Image (cartoon, rainbow, N blue to C red):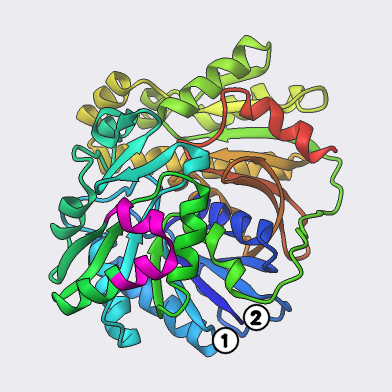
Amino acid sequence: MLLGCIADDFTGATDLANNLVRGGLRTVQTVGVPHQPLQEDVDAVVVALKSRTIAAADAVAQSLAALKWLRQQDCKQIYLKYCSTFDSTPAGNIGPVTEALMQALNCDFTIACPAFPAAGRTIYKGHLFVGDVPLDESGMRDHPLTPMRDANLVRVLQAQMQGKVGLIDYADVARGPEAIRARIDALKAAGVKAAIVDVLNNEDLLRLGCAVRDLPLVTAGSGVAIGLPQNYALSGVVANALPRVNGFRAVVSGSCSVATNAQVAHFKRQGGAARALDVAKLAAGEPEIACLLDWAKPLLATSPVLIYSTAEPADVQAIQSRLGAANAGQLIENALASLASALVEAGVDQMVVAGGETSGAVVQALGIEALRIGPQIDPGVPWTMSIGDKRIALVLKSGNFGGEDFFVKAFQVLQR
């Protein structure tokens, strides 16, 4: 196997697998660390963990377990994938996991590059931009679990790592792979262990991909995956066809991102059947899940239904102040996972799930162990198909990704 990937959430894993497939790498995504050798004939595997917001020590342990399995598959290079908005806190988890993997691989240097220009994530002078604004001025400033209040990624990562963090400036990136490698050599000579890399466009990703072909470990968002397939002798054919499914359709949204708020609003404006999860009733022990299912089931035969906990930042803060951030998040995740399972039992076999934490909870509740990657809907977000006896078409969408028409567009793409 050419490439072994460890992703810190389920939507990010799908995002990464999508870029690898589009580059010609036959790719499978697993849900958690498999217990047996992979039976599929593939070039790359993405192990999807749910480790982005857990305690750093637990994230390290899970990531090392994934690394052990990937090395048993004889992977030539390891890729640690995190969010394109570098979601983390001063306590981790990106830095601690990176250093643990470096130690296990006897690796003395790696890059850190969450850039994904197609999704509006660029890096200049070490600062991450979301669209036209710095990270700390974007919607990520008010993320309920990982609020990002600093756009300087060198500073953010240095707070999480013991080793020294540096920068590969755009002036070197623009000059090509040899200049990038020369900068890496200079940073290593200066004792730097990891470096943020400036990226403004896809051409930069191709230059960077070529430059890091010999690094044992690459850490990045999904964008750097665009530049890696060129390092291998591949056919370049995008193998993303999925079997047809003909059941009911549903959207389950737990993300509170600006993008997902807009997608929920657009779905409702288009006349879509939508209903919000009432967290207050849920916390009070009222039968909110049963009520939502009673509402949804009669509608499934005629149209997709949307069940969402998406809310504006002020509403999220009010819920967190009443229940506690961790308790509120867990309560909502569990409820949406239960709803998703019940919808599948009711005949849904095409489901869009919005939000990384929500996607992880839903996939685990459905007992899905691996996914094939299908056609892309928007940059970073493809359809997938569960591997196993139960065939379910799933979209695992990062909260920040997709245009405002995403929920409507997704089902149109699947039927092409």
**Residue under circle 2?**
38
**120 above or below 101?**
above
Query: In this rendering, does residue 247 appear at all?
Result: yes
**314 above or below 185?**
above
The residue located at (52%, 84%) in the rendering is: 76
**Residue under circle 1?**
73
In the rendered structure, which segment of residues is drawn in magenta? 169-182
Q: Nearer the viewer, residue 231 or 42?
A: 231
Q: Amino acid at mark 1?
A: Gln
Q: Would you identify the image quadrant in which residue 29 lies?
A: bottom right
**319 above or below 129?**
above
Horizontal side of 122 relative to 262 (left or right) equals: left
Query: In this rendering, does residue 222 appear at all?
Result: no
The residue located at (49%, 69%) in the rendering is: 210
Q: Quadrant of the N terminus?
A: bottom right
Disc 1 secondary structure class: loop
Horizontal side of 238 relative to 177 (left or right) equals: right
* Residue 315 % position (x, y): 31, 20
Residue 68, magenta (yes or no): no
Horizontal side of 377 relative to 91 (left or right) equals: right
* Residue 66 % position (x, y): 45, 76
Disc 2 secondary structure class: loop
Label 1 neighbour load within 10 Å: few <14, some 14-19, many 20+: some
Residue 94 - label: none
Q: Would you identify the image quadrant in which residue 239 lies?
A: bottom right
Q: Nearer the viewer, residue 73 or 393?
A: 73
The residue located at (60%, 14%) in the rendering is: 268
